[in-house]
Image (cartoon, rainbow, N blue to C red):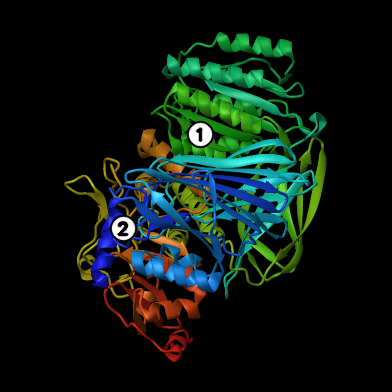
Amino acid sequence: MRRTILGVLALALALLPGAASAIGILIPTDRSYGPMAIESHRVEVQITDRAAVTKVDQVFQNNTDQVLEATYIFPLPAGSSVSQFALWINGERTEGEVLEHEAAARIYQDIVARLRDPGLIEYMGGNLFKARVFPIPARGEQRVEIEFTSVLSFESGVYRYVYPMKTSGESAQTMRDFTLTARIDSAIPIQTIYSPTHEIDINRRDDNHATAGFEREHADLGKDFQLFFTVSSDDVGLSLLTHRPAGEDGFFMMMVTPRNDLEDDEIMGKHVTFVIDTSGSMSGDKMDKAKDALNFCLEHLRSDDLFNIIRFSSDVDLFSEAPVSASESNVDEAKEFVDRMRALGGTAISDALAAALEQPDEEEVPHIIVFLTDGMPTVGQTDTDRIVDDVKRSNEHRARIFVFGLGEDVNANFLDSISQENRGASEYAQGGEELEQKLSGFYGKIAFPVMADLVVKVDGDAEIYDVFPREMPDLFHGGQLLLLGRYRDDGDAEVVLGGKVGAQTKTFSYDVGFPERESDNDFLAHMWATRKVGYLLDNIRLNGEESELVDEVVTLGRRYGIVTPYTSFLVTEDVPVTTARRGQQPWAVDETQQWMFEGPAEPEAMGADDGDWGGYGGGWADSASVAAPSAAPPSTPMGGTRADYERYRALSTLPGTAGQTGTEAAEGEAGRRMSEELRDMREADRQETSGVTRYVAGRLFVQSGGAWVEDGASGASETLEIQYLSGAYFDLLAAHPELGEVLSLGEDVTLRAGEGKAIVILSASGRSSVSAGELEDIFEE
C-alpha cells in the first residue's frame, strides 16, 4: 500500500509545473497530493556589515479542485545564526516554530520518504522552520512571506551569503519569475562582489553601498545562490578563497578590485589607437555602425588621454602622424575624419597594424590598440602566420591589441592569434548593430585604467602554480580581476601585487593563509580546471596538436567532467557506455528531433579494452575527431544539457584545424563560435552544471542508465548495496553526514568508499538494514 501511495505522489509531483523540493515548500497534509507549484519566488536581502535580513515572498498555486491544508517548511541555511523569524500569510502574521536539527531531521526524513525526492537530504544537518497554512483555495494562489535575520560567515576578509534552493533530479522551475536582490551596506569600503553560482548584475552607488542581483523567468531552482563580497580600505583590495581536498594540492582564487571612489588624479590616462577597416566589404550597415561606435569612443575619451585613428583599405590613412590629446577641438576634428570614411578597396591588415605599432610611445600611459576588420588580408603581406609573427616582433612596447571581427568572412584563428600574442582579447559580431553594442561596451570597461602591467608574487611557505589567466590583464576602475590557480605546501604568506600607475611602479601587500585542509569552496576546482582546459585547447587550436597537451586535456576533462573534442561522454538509457573512437559521431538527433548521446552496445564493438571502457561508470572519447550535428537541438535530453551539446558542437572541428591560421574551417560562424567558447572557458568565473556529469563534494559523477556513478567506482572489488530510503540508507547518512550532497543527486547513486570499495544506492533493491560494523568496514582503506 505504501509503495502505491508513493507512486501516486511521484506522479502527482511530475504533473505539477514548478513543483519543487526547494527552500520554502508548501506540502498538503493530504498525502495523495505532492508539493504545490511555485508561481513566483522573490527574495530581498539587506546586508549591513555582517548582519543579513532576508525577506522571501513566494506565491504557490493550488492546481486541485479541493480546499487544502498544508505545511510550509523552510530549511535554514547551514551554519547560519538565526535571531529573528517571522511568517506572514495573506498579510497576517502567523505562528510557526523553529525546529532544531534532530527534530528537523525527522521532518526531512519523512518528506524525503513521502515524495521519493532526495533534494532535502543535503539540508538534514540544519534547522527547519515549520508552519501550518489553511485554508488554501481550490484552483487558487497562496502567498507566503517570510523574514529572518542571520549572521554571515566571515573568513580571510571574505563575507559569504548563501540562499539555499537546490532541488534534486530534474531541477524545478518557477512558473513565472525568480528575483533576488541583495543590498550591501558596509562601514568599510566594499571591494569585490562575486557569485560562483549565478550571473549577477552589480551596481555600486559608492564605496560603501552596492546592489547585486538577478531576475529569471521560469527560473531553474537547481542550485543554491552564493554571494561573496570583500571589504578593505586599501586603494586596491585583494582577498583569497581556497579549497584543498585531503591528500592533494590546493586550489585558490584571488579577487583583486580597486576602490570605487577614486579621484580623477588616481585614474591613469591612456593612449588609444583605433585601427578601422574601410575596405569595400564594410559597406552599408557595417560601416555606419562602426562609425557610430567609434564616435561613441571618441566622445568618452578623458582629457588626459591620447588617441589616434588609422583607416585602412588598399592603403593606410592616419588622422594624425602622432597621437594627440583628447581635447574638445581634437575630438571634433577626429569625428569629421570618421565621417569622411568610405568603404572602398582591399584589406591591408599588415600595413595598418605596422602603422599602429610605429606610433610614438608614451611610457607613462598604457597603449591600447582597438583593431576592427571584417575580412582576411588581401593587400600587401597576406600570409597570416607571417603577419602574426611580424606584429608580435614589432610590438616592442607591449601595446595591448583588442580585435573586433565583423561578419562571416573573418578568420578567428588568425585574429585570435594577433590578440593573444599581444596581451589582448577578441570579440566577434555578425552585424553592425551587434558590433556597435560590443565595441561601446568594451570601451566602457577599459575607459578608466588604474594599474597596468600587473605582477603577483607570493612570499611564504606556500607555492602557487598553474595560475590563470596566464597573462595578467590591466586593472580598470569598476572592474575586478579573478585569478585562479593551484598551491602546494601551506601556511601564512604575503601576497605582493605590483603594477604601473603612470610613470611610477606601485606595490601593495596582503597577509593571507593557504590552509592544509579546506573542504569549502569546492567550486574552485572545477573553475580552475575549466580555465586550464580552455587555455590548453586554445594553445592546440593556434599552435597545433602535441600529444602532451591532448593527454592533459583528456586527464582534466575526465576528472572534472568537462566536455571537449577529446573527452565526450557517451550516455544512453539502455546500453552500456563506451569510449568513442575517431570517426564516430557521439551526438545524434533522433526522429523526434530530440538530441542524445549514442554509443554501441558492447565496448568490443569499438575495439575498447577493459582499461578503456567506463562500464557502469561511463566512458570518454580519446583523441576523437568527429563531425557535429548540423543543427542545434530544439530541446534538452535526459542525458545532457544544451550547454554540453553547444560546447561540443563549437569545438568539434578543433582537432582538424589545429595550428592553421589560414584555414577556411576557422572562418565564419564556425570559427567565431569556437573562439567564443574557448574564451568563455579561459575566463570561467562560475561553476558549470552538466547534464551528463556532476562534480560534487570533490567527486566526479557520471550519469548512466538513469544512475549517477562516481568515476572509478565501477571497478570496485567490494560493494555494499543499500535500498534507497530504507533504514540502512538513513543510517549511512547519519554516520556520514558529509555524504548529504552526494546522496541528493538522486535515487540511484554509486560512490567510492574505502580503497577498492563502493556503496551502491538502488531505488528498487538493496539491503534495508546494515550494522554499524558493516558501514565502518566499507569505508576502511
**Is 544 located above or below residue 321 in the figure?**
below
Kind of residue at badge 1? Glu
The foreground one among 383 and 397 is 397
Task: Count how many numbered circles sit on residues in the image.
Answer: 2
Q: Residue at x 45, y 91 (%)?
A: 773
Q: Nearer the viewer, residue 585 or 114?
A: 114
Tell me: 492 left or right of 30.
right
Residue 774 locus on image (x, y percent)? 42, 89
Compared to 321, does 473 lie above or below?
below
Q: Is residue 150 left or right of residue 94?
A: right
**Residue 387 percent across, percent down from the top left:** 52, 34
Tell me the residue that label 1 is attached to. 427
Asked if the residues shown at circle 1 and circle 2 are in contact, with their CB atoms under 8 angstroms apart, the answer is no
For label 1, count other residues whose C-alpha is less than 10 Å away and answer few (under 14), some (14-19) or many (20+).
Answer: many
In depth, the one of 150 and 514 nearer the eye is 150
Residue 442 showing in the rendered view: yes
Helix, strand or loop under label 2? loop
Quadrant of the image containing the N terminus: bottom left
Q: Quadrant of residue 115?
A: bottom left
Give the alpha-carbon distance from disc 1 to disc 2, as whole Å: 51 Å
Numbered circle sitting on residue 33: 2
Pick the front one: 632 or 390: 632
**Label 2 amino acid?**
Tyr
Residue 364 occupies quadrant: top right
The earlier-in-sequence mark between 1 and 2 is 2
| Relative image position of residue 240 (x, y in whole percent) | 68, 57
